[in-house]
Image (cartoon, grey):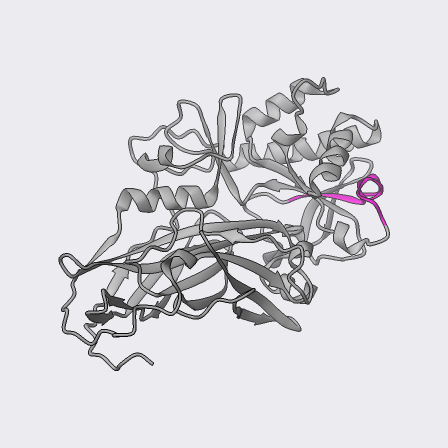
Amino acid sequence: MKKAIPFLFLLISIPSYWGCEKNDNAVDTHPSEESTKQALHAFAKLLIADQKSEGELKRRQVELNARTGDQEFMMVDLKEPGTSLRTPSAIDQLLAQNPLMEIAYPSFAFQTSQTFEQHISQIQYYVVLDEDTEPEEVATLPAYDANGNAVQISSTFNENIRYAVVKIDEARDAIVQGALTTIKGKTIPASLGDFSSLMVVGNITYYEEATFINAQRKDEGPQEGGPVDPRGGGDPEGECDRPANKKDQLYKIRFSNKDAVKVIESGFKLPNVELFITYIFGTVNPANATLTVDAITTQVDKNWSLMNGCCWDGVDNLNQQIRKWNGLDTDIWKVAFVERDRDKDAEDSWSFGFTPSKTVDKVYSIGFPISYSFKKKKQDKLAGEVIIDYCDAAEGEGTSYKVYSGGNDGMYFRENFQTQ
């Protein structure tokens, strides 16, 4: 057991990195809310017309589902290279209006006796979910029936109704070549070029939302925590039970049941759950006994039904893609899970704290409380938070942490080590 040691307590308040404010000198290139709303309605009508004529858009969706299992498609994915769509000019015009539009099928997982092709052939309503509308805040939603008639439907999600939902992709943003702001109106971070894009289509480059968050943090740099007093108290047995070369962590996330998913995600926002996972950690510089505090974000954009069940089979590992643990990082990291719903900042924020510790070169130990906060976006939900101790022994599948309780059970986060 490690010895009791004196702690130097530093209160570190980390500024918000969750949102970006537009630079006054930037050219405003993102679509207006009204033009986006019109484009979403036009996209819904185009899909209905294509469905009735057994067109190329339907064929493309069935093909993508067969290959990837996806049930949520960006509009740009429907414009297959080398394929002549029956309405190519309409697709190009809509892409020019807003290249982040997508079509999703939230009710498919509830129709277990159907194939995907059968399901989309029997859609009852094409729901238009614009950026101003939250299903939880209104009684009805604008939609079109299978014949293209404009209707208003209940905002209460009904698992027995076959929905298609036209909306803006919440997990991605994009930049038009030459623009100074993103499609969603964010200032482009100077460090963005240090990160990989998701894809490039024509003059548009797509990125995960987490990439923008991490690039902005890199622009800001880590927060200086001040000097650490090396007053002894080190552990003569070593710094950690787990060798540094086994601290490159992999994680898995699962929901215990359907009810647990719907606690943090509206039915009309399914089938994918967009979880943003932020790791907060300290790093020690033993040469001058100082420390800094930083954070990285990764994200999950995955069909909720593939994260459901009593076991971990079929649940993808999540790698710490941006920054891996190194020998000078504190042994305890805080992890926060946010289900992302909207890009507009709300007036409040989430704050939470923890006290990471570190034994340096078997000579001295430190501990420092951290207060971390970030702005929330409109309708974002804090799904939960956990503390990960990298000195825990990691064998086999590691440790399962219950992140939150909801519905009949909740969501779990599993730690798993990987040797290098």
Residue 270 belongs to magenta span: no
Residue 115 belongs to magenta span: yes
How many numbered dots are placed on residues in this image?
0
Q: Quadrant of the N terminus?
A: bottom left
Residue at image point 62% right, 45% down: 129
Is 252 located above or below residue 392 in the figure?
A: above
Residue 85 in sight from this viewpoint: yes
Q: Position of residue 102 (x, y in %)?
A: 63, 38
Q: Position of residue 210 (x, y in %)?
A: 45, 46
Query: Magenta segment range?
Result: 114-128
Q: Position of residue 64 (x, y in %)?
A: 71, 35
Left or right, residue 149 beside residue 293: right
Can you tell which quarter of the image residue 73 is in?
A: top right
Can you tell which quarter of the image residue 75 is in?
A: top right
Left or right, residue 10 beside residue 330: left
Q: Position of residue 406 (x, y in %)?
A: 60, 70
Q: 150 or 66, which is in the foreground?
A: 66
Left or right, residue 258 beside residue 390: right
Residue at image point 54% right, 46% down: 132
